[in-house]
Image (tube, rainbow, N blue to C red):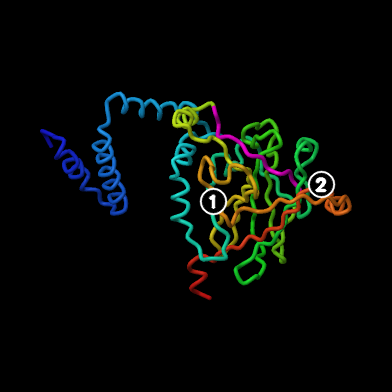
């Protein structure tokens, strides 16, 4: 492998990688090398531009931590997260659609302690979040035929009235984050605050890139939820608010029409009192429709 030229570089490099015994790994590497080389040729990448790209990756690494990944955010704002999510979660009409996980989900308990498991009807607002618009969120986890799904674990997270997620102010623990397990009726219900639109983190290289390209850095308000239930595909999605000014310009491309809900205000003090909050409040009822895993579907 000597005397590489503009014309033979890709073939020589592919040949050097050709002994890969793992067919899928080889397929991915070959396609990545081919597309990267073609990209470099197409834009006639300069040395300064290549250097800037490397500097960008270093800046992402420098600002990333277990609670914050600038690499996930890069994938999000380039639409790669959304595309991977869509390709891997094709579902029939009627099943709730997936949306991006986003950078603020911590799967591990970490230093914050355990995610609080709440009971139906419990409150997440408390004293800390009382400046927000109180909201009653409820629904049923069910299959497409309407049968309730018992034993589903729902994991909710959202931002607070100050616009921040729990991981952005860990001193407050798991603020506005909870898990609920469904019983035989498949129902879930809790009180929380109406989420707010927010910007992607503005102190990192992603924001610098976005601003230079004159891209919107805001996300429409949403409530994140992830649901696991035996026999069903795990669902990761977001519930958006109709009328939000950023629905058509989401910085990370997560919005789907079926996930946009009306968070209309209910003025009834009596209704609010029944669920332990105050009027006016948003009353959100939305069923989560899970799709069986392929093996369970085949067995039906
Ligand atoms: Fe979010």
- Image point 69% across, 36% down: which residue? 173
Counting from the top left corner in percent of width and height, residue 66 is at 53, 34
Q: Residues within 10 Å of mark 2 (few under 14, many from 20)?
A: some
Q: Is residue 111 left or right of residue 188?
A: left
The quarter of the picture where residue 13 lies is top left
Point out the quarter of the image occupied by ligand 1: top right
In magenta stretch: residue 49: no
**Residue 64 seen in the figure:** yes
Q: For the magenta stretch, what is the residue range?
A: 191-202
Circles 2, 1 touching at the beta carbon (< 8 Å):
no
Query: Mark 2 highlights which residue?
Result: 280
For this orientation, the residue located farthest to the top is 48
For this orientation, the residue located farthest to the right is 270
In magenta stretch: residue 194: yes
Query: Mark 1 highlights which residue?
Result: 99
For this orientation, the residue located farthest to the bottom is 300
**Quadrant location of the N terminus?**
top left
- Image point 26% across, 36% down: which residue? 40
Q: Is residue 59 left or right of residue 114?
A: left
Upstream in sequence: badge 2 or badge 1: 1
Counting from the top left corner in percent of width and height, residue 221 is at 63, 43
Counting from the top left corner in percent of width and height, residue 69 is at 50, 35
- Image point 69% across, 56% down: which residue? 181
Looking at the image, is 36 positioned above or below residue 289?
above
Distance, label 2 to label 1, CA atoms, is 29 Å
The quarter of the picture where residue 192 lies is top right
Closer to viewer: mark 2 or mark 1: 2
Counting from the top left corner in percent of width and height, residue 87 is at 43, 55
Q: Is mark 2 within 8 Å of ligand 1?
A: no
């Amino acid at each position: 492998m000597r005397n590489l030229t503009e014309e033979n570089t890709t073939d020589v490099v592919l040949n050097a990688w050709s002994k890969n015994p793992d067919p899928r790994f080889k397929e991915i590497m070959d396609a990545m090398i081919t597309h990267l080389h073609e990209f470099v040729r197409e834009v006639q990448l300069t040395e300064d531009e290549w250097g800037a790209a490397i500097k960008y990756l270093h800046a992402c690494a420098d600002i990333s931590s277990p609670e914050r990944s600038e690499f996930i955010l890069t994938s999000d704002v380039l639409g790669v997260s959304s595309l991977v999510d869509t390709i891997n979660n094709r579902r029939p009409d009627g099943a709730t659609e997936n949306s991006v996980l986003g950078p603020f989900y911590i799967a591990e308990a970490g230093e914050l302690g355990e995610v609080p498991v709440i009971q139906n009807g419990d409150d997440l607002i408390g004293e800390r979040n009382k400046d927000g618009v109180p909201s009653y969120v409820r629904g049923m986890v069910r299959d497409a035929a309407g049968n309730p799904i018992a034993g589903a674990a729902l994991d909710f997270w959202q931002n607070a009235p100050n616009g921040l997620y729990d991981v952005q102010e860990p001193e407050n623990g798991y603020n506005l984050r909870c898990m609920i397990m469904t019983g035989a009726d498949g129902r879930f219900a809790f009180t929380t605050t109406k989420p707010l639109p927010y910007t992607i983190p503005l102190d990192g290289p992603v924001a610098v890139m976005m601003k230079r390209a004159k891209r919107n850095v805001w996300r429409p308000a949403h409530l994140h939820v992830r649901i696991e239930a035996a026999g069903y595909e795990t669902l990761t999605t977001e519930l958006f608010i109709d009328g939000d000014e950023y629905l058509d310009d989401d910085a990370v491309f997560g919005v789907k029409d079926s996930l946009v809900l009306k968070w209309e205000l209910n003025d009834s003090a009596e209704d609010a009192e029944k669920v332990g909050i105050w009027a006016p409040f948003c009353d959100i009822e939305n069923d989560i429709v899970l799709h069986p895993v392929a093996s369970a579907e085949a067995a039906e």
